[in-house]
């Protein structure tokens, strides 16, 4: 039997951390044609379609998908899998396509029109079943989404994950380079490694790299020389998200990358600078408001700050564990604050041992989630 599986996915993290491992699992099960459908998203970086071509056979922005209706062209059973985007949009698409809709969801609420609620946790599984919905406990597929390797890096590699969204690259990358400078000044054996998300515009990243140092090459340089008062060093840059084979520490903004660190068993420090809180996208209708208008910037800063204060944790490993597994650095921060916290984590192995044990438990629980999703969709 052949299948058409159309995956609804929008943000960069969902694309690389959710869709990529699920697509690989689906292909391993038989004759499966894969389509990525990308609706508008406030977190989009502009490179989602290009990155999705590495994952799916066909890629459609939502508007073109609705106009061309490609599900009518190919043979095989048709399925719609919601991995990201509005779940109600997935239901409407399923009605238009006349096919079953399965949804990977992060909330314990049933949605009418969803055939199977694919959930990451036992708590959500119980909540869906208590409401009379059909739930399948699958886990987090990002634990199957191991990034490529760039091989060993000399010295003590410290990975700096600057995010996959444009505002993170423009503002977060320079912040982390300054933090790396402070770290190298104190610990000269450190080699900073900056994996660049494949969804980011390379020209934007090149511009940022040129503003913080001297790239060694004009086209996607692998090394950037950075000079600051009292320190000069080279930082490694990878352009496909590749990681060194021997990282000593992972520093990242909140996001999918946090769980990749957990899956790889790398000590993690999560940092959320609120210095430019007005540039952080908001979910839902709030994300459509033009916050650049006069008088709205401070309101958005207040909204973002309140949202962060109301969260028990900002990092995904802490949310999964329900307790502080990894350190979180939040607020109006200076690069030296990050450098100091990272250096302390490197210096005291006893602080890393409980974290790595929790990571092993998470990985054992969630490894194979992509295959569980694939089997649920095709059954």
Image (cartoon, grey):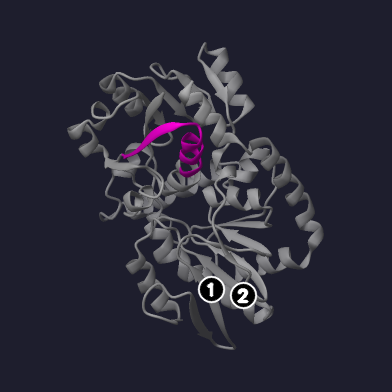
Q: Return the x and y of residue 239 as percentages of the image width and height.
A: 45, 65
**Which x, y percent locates residue 346?**
73, 66
Find residue 11 and report its image quarter.
top left
Q: Which residue is mark 2?
A: 191
Q: Nearer the viewer, residue 10 or 339?
A: 10
Q: Residue at x 69, y 78 (%)?
A: 187
Please say whether residue 107 is visible from this viewpoint.
Answer: no
Magenta segment boundaries in residue numbering:
20-38
On screen, residue 70 above or below 149:
above
Would you call the spot at circle 2 few (<14 residues within 10 Å), some (14-19), or many (20 or more)? many
Secondary structure beneath dot 2 equals strand
Look at 38% across and 52% down and name the residue there.
51
Q: Image height check: is 82 above or below 46?
A: above
| Residue 288 falls inside the magenta stretch | no
Q: Which mark is residue 236?
A: 1
Is residue 372 at all visible to an observer of this figure? Answer: yes
Would you say the residues marked 1 and 2 are in contact, meaning their CB atoms lie under 8 Å apart? yes
How many residues crowd mark 1 within 10 Å: few (<14), some (14–19), many (20+)? many
Residue pushed farthest bottom? Answer: 230
Residue 182 pos. (x, y %): 60, 77
């Amino acid at each position: 039997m052949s299948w058409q599986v159309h995956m609804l996915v929008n943000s960069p993290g969902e694309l690389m951390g959710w869709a990529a491992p699920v697509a690989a699992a689906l292909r391993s099960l038989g004759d499966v044609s894969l389509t990525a459908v990308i609706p508008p998203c406030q977190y989009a970086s502009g490179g989602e379609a290009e990155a999705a071509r590495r994952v799916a056979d066909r890629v459609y922005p939502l508007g073109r998908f609705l106009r061309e209706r490609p599900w009518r062209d190919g043979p095989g059973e048709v399925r719609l899998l919601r991995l990201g985007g509005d779940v109600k949009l997935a239901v409407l698409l399923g009605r238009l396509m006349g096919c079953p809709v399965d949804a990977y969801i992060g909330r314990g609420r049933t949605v009418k029109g969803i055939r199977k609620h694919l959930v990451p946790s036992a708590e959500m599984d119980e909540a869906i079943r208590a409401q009379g919905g059909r739930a399948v406990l699958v886990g987090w597929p990002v634990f199957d989404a191991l990034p490529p390797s760039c091989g060993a890096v000399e010295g003590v590699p410290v990975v700096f994950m600057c995010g996959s969204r444009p505002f993170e690259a423009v503002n977060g990358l320079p912040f982390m380079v300054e933090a790396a400078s402070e770290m190298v000044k104190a610990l000269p054996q450190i080699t900073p490694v900056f994996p660049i998300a494949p969804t980011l515009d390379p020209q934007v990243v090149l511009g940022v790299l040129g503003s913080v140092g001297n790239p060694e090459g004009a086209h996607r340089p692998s090394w950037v020389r950075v000079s600051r008062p009292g320190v000069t060093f080279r930082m490694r840059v990878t352009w496909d998200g590749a990681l060194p084979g021997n990282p000593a520490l992972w520093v990242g903004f909140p996001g999918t990358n946090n769980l990749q660190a957990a899956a790889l068993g790398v000590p993690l420090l999560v940092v959320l600078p609120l210095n430019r809180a007005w540039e952080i996208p908001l979910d839902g209708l709030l994300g459509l408001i033009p916050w650049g208008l006069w008088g709205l910037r401070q309101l958005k800063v207040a909204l973002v700050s309140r949202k962060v204060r109301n969260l028990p944790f900002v990092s995904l490993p802490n949310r999964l564990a329900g307790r502080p597994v990894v350190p979180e650095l939040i607020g109006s921060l200076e690069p030296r604050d990050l450098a100091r916290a990272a250096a302390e984590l490197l210096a005291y192995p006893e602080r890393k041992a409980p974290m790595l044990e929790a990571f092993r438990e998470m990985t054992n629980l969630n490894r194979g989630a992509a295959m569980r999703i694939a089997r649920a969709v095709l059954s």
